[in-house]
Amino acid sequence: MFAEFLQKHPMEDLLRSGTREMYPPAENRNAWDAIPEKYRQEIREMGDRYGKIPYPERSASGFLAFARTGDRQADEKPYFTRRRKLCAAVLLCCAFPDTDTEDVVNGVWHLCEESSWVISAHNINPIPGAPKASEYPLPDIRKPYIDLFSAQTGMILALTASLLGKRLDEVSPLIRKRVREEIRRRILRPFMATDDFWWMGFRRKDLNNWTPWILSNIMVCAVLDAMPRHNLAALLTRACGMLDRYVDILPEDGGCDEGAGYWNMAGGALLDCLTILESITGGQMSFREDHKIRNILRFPLTAELGNGWFVNFADCDARPFISGERLETAGRMLEDPALTALGTRMRGTAADQLNDVPHLTRVLDLVFHAAAGEKNETAGAIGDSWLPDLQVRKLRRGPWTLACKGGHNGENHNHNDVGSFILTQDGEPVVVDAGNMIYTAKTFSEERYTLWNIRAGWHNLPMIGSREQKEGRTHAARNVICTPDGMELELQDTYEQEAGVLQLKRRFALTPEGLRLTDEGKLRTAEEVTWVFLLRNEPKWEKGSVTAGKLRIRCPEELTFTAEEKPVTDARMARNWPGSLWRVRLKSKKADVFRMTFEFSANDREA
């Protein structure tokens, strides 16, 4: 797509029509004084809050903690605090020109003095033959690696120099020179000199959000660098080749198997790249009409459950932060009122953009791009959706919204959850997916599937005897069919052969009265089958009926009921599920053939 376009329209020629100014510099008082008062106040509050804390130390022992104990936070907490504090100081100086630049200068100094801009958990390049973290516990300053956050650090510093250049020169012209050289040494030269970084797609083909996220930040660094036009053209052409490799691996339906929360740095980062390319070429390089691009940008709309809840299969939060301004911008680009309205409802605050990750461009986009209009709490919601490649189905009927999935257990940020589902009632989740937790060394290691929230035994699925679904791409749904009222699929291949599952067909049917879930199976030998449901509210059992708040689950009386409270102690998960979740297990007697139906409806007594 991108490379093909550039064969007919060389980048160096396109660059003659665009602009390299991305945002108004601080001395453009007309622009900065015109940003909405609410954002000026937020910038003031954020700057004052961060101004009261010093730049924290980023130590070798903190960096080593990941290799030694698996602790990511020992390095990441000071790392991100430094960057958020610098972003807040830059915004404060731009919005309020009487502000002293000392915090900005000190922040620039701290970041330029760091041995590496890579976080400790990313201090390896996961390609065949690359060293492991245990062999490479500290960064090698002779070989700068570009990860997500080193590229983002380059973006922050490039924008700092661009926005506050004249005021920094008043302190010392060497500040901007140092920033320029550090970005070139750590980001731009390595980017052009090596094909070895896995996210480039030369040596690994299984790309993910790293590719567009990193490229969007490298593009900012390059556009704001004073390099000659032909050098910028070469760099952007190279980046476009990598974008091609990323887009090629995405499904035609635009679905993101990492979840809606990852759209920020997947589809949203791709949008960043697209808008930069449009701006730098004067609108000549545009892909707004491409079908796949449109699907990628619309993905959050297909994953929205309402009231801030989203389909959160895989490592995704149930109420993820998604940049509303980016959704709004995508909606305007695509002339899609529903997507635009969703973005308007989710615009959030300036602090939101930094609290997710310190993404200075997103704050600037928020304050300089006016909202599309008044928030509308109902416009933008879509009813039924079907992503045939991702195999995710969503539909609304009356007070109920169902999301269910097929797919396979080798997806990006995979949970063993083929055939699982989420059910909301009156806009609130009642049968849930626990979602994500704070990342540790286990999260992306061989021990990943020891984590409870990732195992199939904590998703809304059957267990055969004591056996759960297994990880791996071959453990996949078969014969997946989208039906008018839900979905049908076969799950026998999601279990290991030793489980002896000859056939397991699951059917979802949603009506305004609720959900009917039917499982039919045939086993090699007679086994007990246990159906797991993860509920938001505490369950109670009467023969043939489970009640949990406003929800009732009707089932055969002969099933054995057990319930387990799961206090949510992880800080990240607790933002979505404060308190506890409840795992219900309904066990059958041994049989080699079974047909089981569960009916999810309103609890009349609660109503």
Image: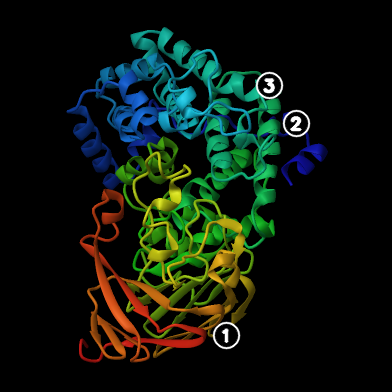
Q: SS of the residue at dot 3?
A: helix
Instruction: Specify the label residue 484 is tagged with.
Output: 1
Query: Residue at point 43% right, 42% down?
Result: 362
Residue 59 in view (yes/no): no
**Amino acid at pointer 3:** Asn
Outermost residue, right side: 8
Query: Residue at point 44% right, 43% down?
Result: 365
Q: Nearer the viewer, mark 3 or mark 1?
A: 1
Label 2 packing within 10 angstroms: few (<14), some (14-19), many (20+): few
Q: SS of the residue at dot 1?
A: loop
Instruction: Specify the label residue 231 is tagged with.
Output: 3
Front residue of 466 and 170: 466
Outermost residue, front side: 525
Left or right: 132 in relation to 602: right
In the rendered image of this protein, does residue 369 appear above or below residue 165? Answer: below
**Distance in Å between CA atoms under marks 2 and 3:** 12 Å
Query: Residue at point 25% right, 91% down?
Result: 604
In the rendered image of this protein, does residue 219 appear above or below residue 167? Answer: below
In the rendered image of this protein, does residue 268 appear above or below residue 153? Answer: below
Sequence order check, earlier mark of 2 and 1: 2
Label 3 packing within 10 angstroms: few (<14), some (14-19), many (20+): few
Label 1 packing within 10 angstroms: few (<14), some (14-19), many (20+): few
**Amino acid at pointer 1:** Pro
Image quarter (top left, top right, bottom left or bottom right) of the C terminus: bottom left
**Residue at which label 2 appears:** 13
Sequence order check, earlier mark of 3 and 1: 3
Sequence order check, earlier mark of 2 and 3: 2
Q: SS of the residue at dot 2?
A: helix
